[in-house]
């Protein structure tokens, strides 16, 4: 009898541990799309690139999003969110990036509300991109959502906004680039 109880407890413990490792936390139902920037027929590198970004809420509820570290961030152009890759040799084009800390709590301007089925558009200007004439590139936006609440901004308790509590977060390994890569030709 004692062996059966021990076996049951052991099996239940193993099941519990495995279920925790298999189940992943829910991630925000947001889709990022990039529009290919236009490049002049003739240019002298480095050149600025302007990327049109849209974030669509694919969910059935509003989404309140912290813009920090996302394509909606006002500093997205220097945060290393965008990666430009030479398609000929898979080499990453070096662009200037900056790392900095932000002071908590975020301000109200650091949040945006996206209605169900709605989208937010942004324009990101990346300065001084060393593209070469006659080459093809892809551009991807990579990262994760730091805080998303599936409700109206006005309904999220102020304390939750200040402490980023009760929010969904994108997984670190999951990125926006899965199907958002775009082509760019300098030919």
Image: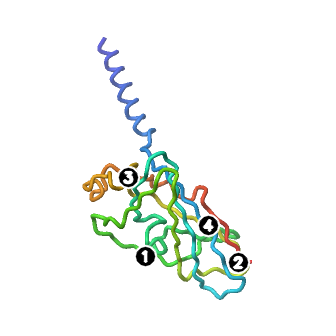
Marks 1 and 2: which is nearer the front? 2
Q: Quadrant of the C terminus?
A: bottom right
Pinpoint residue 30: horizontal percent, then vertical percent.
Answer: 50, 53
Q: Residue at x 41, y 52 (%)?
A: 169
Residue 39 in the figure: left or right of residue 142: right
- Residue at mark 3: 152
- Residue at mark 1: 98
N-term-proximal mark, 3 vs 1: 1
Under tag 4, what secondary structure? strand
Q: Which mark is residue 35?
A: 4
Marks 3 and 1: which is nearer the front? 3
Q: Using a 10 Å C-alpha cutoff, classify the residue at mark 1 as few (fewer than 14 neighbours), some (14 to 19) or many (20 or more).
A: few
Marks 3 and 4: which is nearer the front? 3
N-term-proximal mark, 3 vs 2: 3
Pinpoint residue 175: horizontal percent, then vertical percent.
Answer: 52, 57
Residue 31 in the figure: left or right of residue 67: right
Residue placed furthest toward the top:
1
Q: Tags 3 and 1 in contact by the CB under 8 Å rule?
A: no
Disc 3 from disc 2: Cα separation? 43 Å
């Amino acid at each position: 009898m004692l062996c059966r109880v021990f076996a049951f407890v052991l099996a239940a413990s193993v099941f519990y541990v495995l279920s925790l490792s298999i189940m992943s936390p829910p991630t925000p139902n947001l889709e990022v799309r990039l529009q290919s920037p236009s490049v002049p027929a003739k240019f002298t590198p480095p050149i600025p690139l302007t990327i049109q970004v849209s974030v669509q809420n694919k969910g059935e509820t509003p989404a309140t999003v912290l813009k920090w570290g996302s394509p909606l961030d006002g500093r997205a152009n220097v945060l290393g969110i965008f990666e430009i890759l030479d398609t000929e040799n898979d080499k990453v084009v070096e662009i200037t990036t900056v790392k900095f800390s932000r002071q908590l709590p975020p301000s109200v301007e650091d949040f945006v509300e996206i209605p169900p089925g709605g989208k937010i558009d942004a324009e990101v200007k990346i300065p001084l991109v060393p593209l070469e004439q006659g080459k093809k590139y892809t551009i991807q936006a990579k990262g994760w959502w730091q805080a998303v609440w599936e409700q109206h901004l006005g309904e999220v308790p102020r304390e939750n906004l200040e402490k980023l509590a009760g929010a969904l977060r994108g997984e670190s390994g999951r990125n926006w680039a899965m199907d958002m890569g775009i082509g760019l030709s300098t030919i």
